[in-house]
Image (cartoon, grey):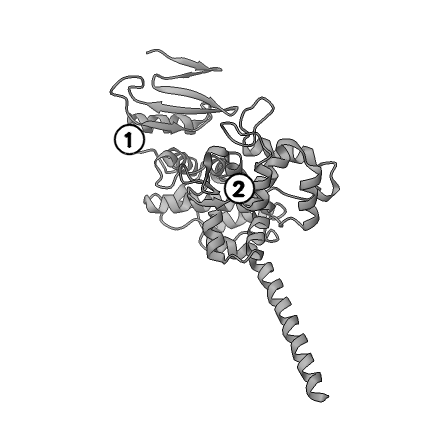
Amino acid sequence: MRQRKNNTIELPRGVHRVVARGREFFYWQRGRGTKHAGPRVKLPNDPHSPEFWTALRQAQGIVGPVATDTVDALIDAYIAAWPTLPKKLAQNTQDNYRRGLKRARAAWGKLAAKGLRPIHVREVMKALADKPGAANGFLGAMQALSKWALVNDLIDVSLTDGVTGYDTGGGFLPWTAAQVAAAHDKLTGMIRRGVLLELYTGQRGSDMVRLGPTMIDDGGFDLGWKGQQKTGQRPWVPILPELAAEIATWERRPGPFVTTGTGRPFTRTYFSVLFRAATKDIPELANAHLHGLRATAVINLKRGGLTDLEISDAVGMSLEMVKHYTRFEDKRASGKASLVKLADHATRKNTVRQ
């Protein structure tokens, strides 16, 4: 059987490697290159990992059900099932889950999966109390694992029932007016372009790096052709006048608006790295996070008069998240309305006295 090499790993027939945007991806396809070719199945990205070979064996159908008696085996089975899940996991979600599940392997890998209980998950959460972001990431991975394992009758009880995450201060803060002004005035090139795209569309970085002129339809970005990377939602995102004026100054060419110096598309991670490097000497942006632009966009749309439901449709965001991002803006508007009412009441009271 002809085999190909990837460093020191030999890839069996039917497994092929694809390099895109500087990253490696692996797929298995029965009868690849023939008229009898079967469906293409995505494999984990690391051929050195046991998850890769477990997923390959499952795709080939040469083994029975994967053992799930230990926590390690249960996690292997879950990762192997990712390509077959009804709701596909974005690559960034897969990476986050792997980090969380790595902690589960370290804590209980060789122990019986059916002996795991929420109290054990809570103990790991306590050990990560000084790292709330990492703790919440671990909990999210365990919740996903637990939900899948319960549905597939691989465990008897939920692994996370009653376990809550840490309060991280409401997530990334929206940008202030001074930070937005600094982005306009002090950022340059592709970093400025990417920031403005996020600011005026409310899209995640993973979707911002895909936006390009061919996606513009009837005055907005149509994400219906493929959907958002993380959620699969297919919004039509209106192009606000401020962004339209910026786009009018950009060269029109195929591909995304934001590219590297060689013309290649950015990944979300690489753009974030360059953003941080570009802002290290801009005091106003010292504590600004790219994900805060998503909240900023939602708040700006709220101030523009859109309802929560309209914002949800325009940005491709759940109604709950829209309400989460705009809760402070709603309180501000309510407070201002109260001042108007109080001033009006005082005026009428003085008029009566006179």
Q: Outermost residue, left direction? A: 36
- Where residue 49 appears, as percent x and y from the top left, is 46, 26
How many numbered circles does the render carry?
2
Vertical placement of 265 versus 192: above or below? above
In 3D space, how far apart are the residues under numbered discs 1 and 2 (Cα atoms)? 40 Å
Of residue 307 and residue 98, the one placed in the foreground of this image is 307
Q: Outermost residue, top direction? A: 2
Label 1: how many residues lie within 10 Å, few (<14), some (14-19) or many (20+)?
few
Q: In the rendered view, does 67 fall on the left or right side of 179?
A: left
Contact flag, marks 1 and 2 (Cβ < 8 Å):
no
Picture residue at 41% right of the left edge, 46% below the top: 146
Mark 1: amino acid: Gly
| Secondary-structure class at tag 2 | loop
| Secondary-structure class at tag 1 | loop
Vertical placement of 115 versus 348: above or below? above
Picture residue at 53% right of the left edge, 28% below the top: 265
Picture residue at 37% right of the left edge, 38% below the top: 69
Residue 301, disc: none
Whether residue 106 is visible to the viewer of this picture, yes or no, is no
- Where residue 112 appears, as percent x and y from the top left, is 41, 41
Vertical placement of 252 versus 161: above or below? above
Of residue 148 and residue 354, the one placed in the foreground of this image is 354
Q: In the rendered view, does 208 fall on the left or right side of 34?
A: right
Vertical placement of 264 versus 202: above or below? above
Picture residue at 68% right of the left edge, 84% below the top: 349
Circle 1 residue: 64
Whether residue 338 is visible to the viewer of this picture, yes or no, is yes
Circle 2 residue: 204
Residue 38 location, quadrant = top left
State the quadrant of the C terminus.
bottom right
Mark 2: amino acid: Arg
